Image (cartoon, grey):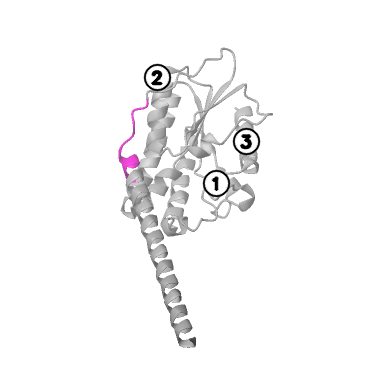
């Protein structure tokens, strides 16, 4: 009887181990498929910029208008109550690469009266895409700077005063990001930011990276989730932004 019990117990233990192993292998497979899908999606986004029709934004005669342009980091940056400008349009869209921001801006400008000021914050999604294909990182770095310069030229041609922010570095990586965000990608953010700072002879540069990530990674006190800023982070940037606009 004792032997039968032990034998039965061993069988159930073996089945439990096998089932857990199958579950683990299935999870790894699904994770790999998700990573592969997202990788192909991001590579497509880098190579194909949709032809945005643009949005006709309302005009506000005799009022100071600012456009916030970029990706999810711009989208989450709302106007503070004490900001000195009358109208703040948030044109940011989550997930956009710099190339997609550029094409959206073309569409918006084609249908709308140009603002007095425009603030640009983008580039992190391009770098994120290179995590799925490290071979494109060098070309991505060049493309980000080229796209930003095109945005600046487009806005200056419409007599818009431009503030371009440096790319906000990522904070503490999630478990997933530790497989995708390499030291080379963090270095790419620093390298691109140096190029952005060199644009200060043409536009205002708000060195957001130096403010919220003085040591190369966004400080926890300013970070919402490692990628996006919290309200404290946006508040400190808004203070710096207001000073640049007021002193104009």
Helix or strand or loop: what does disc 3 sit on?
A: helix
Q: Residue furthest front?
A: 1
The numbered mark at residue 77 is none
Foreground residue, 234 or 26? 26
Which residue is more in the foreground, 187 or 13?
13
Residue 90: percent from left, percent from top: 53, 29
C-alpha separation, residue under disc 3 versus residue under disc 2: 28 Å
Q: Quadrant of residue 229?
A: top right
Counting residues from the N terminus, which is met first, the one under dot 1 or under dot 3?
1
How many C-alpha atoms fall within 10 Å of the one at disc 3: few (<14), some, or many (≥20)? some
Query: Cα distance, mark 1 to mark 3?
Result: 14 Å
Secondary structure at badge 2 equals helix
Residue segment shown in magenta: 43-52
Image mark for residue 238: 3
Residue identified by numbered label 2: 110
Indicate which disc, 1 or 2, sits on the residue closer to the N terminus: 2
The answer to whether 228 is drawn above or below residue 131 in the figure is above
Residue at 45% of width from left, 45% of height from top? 124
Q: Earlier in the sequence, mark 3 or mark 2?
A: 2
Mark carried by residue 209:
1
Quadrant including the C terminus: top right
Q: Residue furthest top?
A: 61
Expressed as whole percent of the image width and height from the top left, the position of residue 35 reads 37, 53
Q: Is residue 152 above or below residue 219?
A: above
- Which residue is drawn at the image coordinates 51% and 21% (left, top)? 115
Residue 89 appears in the rendering: yes
């Amino acid at each position: 009887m004792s032997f039968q019990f032990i034998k039965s117990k061993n069988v159930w233990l073996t089945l439990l181990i096998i089932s857990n192993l199958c579950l683990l292998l299935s999870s790894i497979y699904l994770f790999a498929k998700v990573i592969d899908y997202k990788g192909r999606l991001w590579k497509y986004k880098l190579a194909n910029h949709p032809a945005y029709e643009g949005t006709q934004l309302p005009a506000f005669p005799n009022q100071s208008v600012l456009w916030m342009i970029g990706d999810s980091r711009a989208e989450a940056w709302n106007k503070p109550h004490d900001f000195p400008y009358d109208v703040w349009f948030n044109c940011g869209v989550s997930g956009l690469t710099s190339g997609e921001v550029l094409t959206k801006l073309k569409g918006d400008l084609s249908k709308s009266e140009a603002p007095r000021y425009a603030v640009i914050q983008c580039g992190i999604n391009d770098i994120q895409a290179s995590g799925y294909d490290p071979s494109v990182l060098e070309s991505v770095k060049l493309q980000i700077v080229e796209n930003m310069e095109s945005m600046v030229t487009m806005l200056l041609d419409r007599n818009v005063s431009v503030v371009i922010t440096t790319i906000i570095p990522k904070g503490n990586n999630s478990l997933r990001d530790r497989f995708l965000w390499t030291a080379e990608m963090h270095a790419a953010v620093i390298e691109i930011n140096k190029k952005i700072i060199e644009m200060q002879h043409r536009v205002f540069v708000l060195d957001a990276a130096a403010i919220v990530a003085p040591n190369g990674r966004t400080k926890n006190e300013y970070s919402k989730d490692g990628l996006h800023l919290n309200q404290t982070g946006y508040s400190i940037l808004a203070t710096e932004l207001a000073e640049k606009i007021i002193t104009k």
